[in-house]
């Protein structure tokens, strides 16, 4: 389980050079600032977590329960509110601000976001099925094949890989390296791509798969 995390906005992708001259594709994330709105304790709530607020919003655009929640915490209203499960020994305080300095270059992180929605897609694009024969009069070029027996069980099993909604689901990309931290502009540059479209909100946590040895 993670020991720290924050919400960030995906700005886009670019390229940077390392000290060795290697060209790396990186994703630029605007890391916060996030504000701790509430805490969850194991003794009281049964689990340990921190509730983070991210993104400014007009007070007129939130309902009364949310406004009361922010007022009780003594913080300004935020557009996004999310709980992050953390270890019990993680120490945070209500009202504490979290920025890009929470992470440093060389750390490994996991990024969770909502993948791009592709709409209704066929089984070949959605599940990477192979095609059938395309010559000799074949009519099974893009057929899905068998989806079950006829008389027994006389139904299609749940989870059968078929055509349907592709994307727009929560996905986590693990074990990504923080290449650079820009404290002035509050940016994180992470090696590789992360789920989500531009300007989407993602969750950045320290990775559960930390390297055992030294990694450059």
Image (tube, helix red, strand yellow):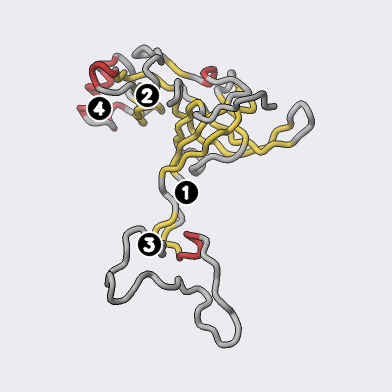
Categorize mark 2 by other alpha carbons within 10 Å: few (<14), some (14-19), many (20+). Answer: many
| Nearest the eye: 82 or 33 | 82
- Read off the residue under disc 4: 66
- Read off the residue under disc 2: 52
Residue at the (49%, 38%) spot, across then down: 199
Q: Position of residue 157 (x, y in %)?
A: 32, 63
Q: Earlier in the sequence, mark 4 or mark 3?
A: 4
Q: Which mark is residue 65?
A: none
Q: Which of marks 1 and 2 is nearer the N terminus?
A: 2
- Read off the residue under disc 1: 116
CA distance for labels 1 and 4: 28 Å
CA distance for labels 1 and 2: 24 Å
Q: Which of marks 2 and 4 is nearer the N terminus?
A: 2
Quadrant in which the N terminus appears: top left
Is label 3 or label 1 in front?
Answer: 3
Q: Which mark is residue 160?
A: 3
Q: Relative to 159, is 102 above or below?
A: above
| Nearest the eye: 207 or 54 | 207
Tell me the SS state at disc 1.
loop
């Amino acid at each position: 389980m993670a020991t720290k995390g924050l919400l960030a906005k995906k700005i886009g992708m670019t390229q940077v050079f390392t000290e060795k001259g290697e060209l790396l594709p990186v994703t630029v994330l605007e890391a916060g600032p996030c504000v701790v709105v509430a805490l969850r304790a194991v003794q009281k709530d049964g689990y340990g977590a921190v509730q983070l607020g991210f993104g400014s919003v007009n007070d007129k655009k939130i309902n009364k329960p949310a406004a009361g929640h922010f007022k009780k915490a003594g913080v300004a209203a935020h557009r996004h509110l999310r709980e992050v499960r953390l270890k019990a020994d993680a120490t945070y305080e209500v009202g504490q601000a979290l920025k890009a300095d929470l992470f440093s270059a060389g750390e490994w992180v996991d990024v969770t976001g909502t993948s791009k929605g592709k709409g209704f897609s066929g089984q070949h694009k959605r599940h990477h099925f192979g095609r059938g024969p395309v010559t000799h009069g074949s009519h099974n070029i893009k057929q899905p094949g068998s989806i079950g027996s006829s008389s027994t069980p006389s139904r299609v099993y749940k989870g059968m890989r078929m055509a349907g909604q592709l994307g727009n689901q929560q996905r986590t990309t693990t074990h990504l390296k923080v290449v650079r931290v820009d404290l002035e502009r509050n940016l994180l540059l992470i090696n590789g791509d992360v789920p989500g479209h531009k300007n989407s909100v993602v969750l950045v946590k320290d990775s559960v798969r930390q390297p055992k040895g030294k990694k450059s």
